[in-house]
Image: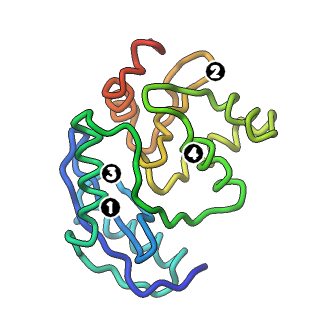
Amino acid sequence: MTKRSFIYVTEMNSPIGALTIASTDYGVCLIEFGPVKESCSAIRTWTKKHFMNAELKEDAEKLQPVVTELEEYFAGTRTSFSVKLDLVGSKFQCLVWEKVKLIPYGETKSYKQIAMEIGAPKAVRAIGGSNNKNPVPILIPCHRVIGSNGSMVGYGGGLDKKEHLLRLEGAIERIS
């Protein structure tokens, strides 16, 4: 558990619906699917667990760089992100997220491929569990992780959002 004074939040509209974005002074720490009003309870719970008594504070200006990068991504003009992240997770989760972050735009990998790449070939289910706990979907592109047979399985925002993101990136034709 790390001490942070403020967790800054803002909301943006996107082609997959409202996104609530949260950041510490160190970087983006959470993206929730849905508007701030609906996400605040989950963000408060998550914040208490990971950042002790940090206070939520709406600050669109502070989060404008990540909003801009996400808008560019959804417009099809950005294929990677440069905003800093402030990730909280187990050593294993962070290892998985770093591997997933390396999956190129428009490409997919299976949970099994990720497991092999981190040297834990039998950890396919643990890879799925880590992917499910990814606090910054889209920035860490867990939507690019699919089943070994090419099927779209599991996505915290729903399979419709995963399909939309993969279609946006041009990857869906290769896995359909």
Q: Amino acid at mark 3?
A: Phe
Measuring from the top left, give residue 129's x and y in whole percent.
63, 46
**Residue 148 in which image quadrant:** top right
- Residue highlighted by disc 4: 131
User: Mark 4 falls on what kind of element?
Assistant: helix
Q: Amino acid at mark 2?
A: Ser
- Residue highlighted by disc 3: 33
Instruction: Please give the name of the residue rendered at 57% of the width and 66% of the height, measured from the top-left corner.
Output: 88
91 or 158: nearer the viewer: 91
User: Mark 1 falls on what kind of element?
Assistant: strand
Instruction: Please give the name of the residue rendered at 27% of the width and 53% of the height, measured from the top-left corner.
Output: 19
Q: Which mark is residue 21?
A: 1
Q: Up-down: is 46 above or below 94?
A: below
User: Mark 3 falls on what kind of element?
Assistant: strand
- Residue highlighted by disc 2: 148
Q: In terms of sequence position, does the residue under pointer 3 or pointer 2 come before the other?
A: 3
Q: Amino acid at mark 4?
A: Asn
State how far apart marks 3 and 2 are (Cα). 26 Å
Q: In terms of sequence position, does the residue under pointer 2 or pointer 4 come before the other?
A: 4
Instruction: Please give the name of the residue rendered at 29% of the width and 48% of the height, measured from the top-left corner.
Output: 70
State how far apart marks 1 and 2 are (Cα). 31 Å
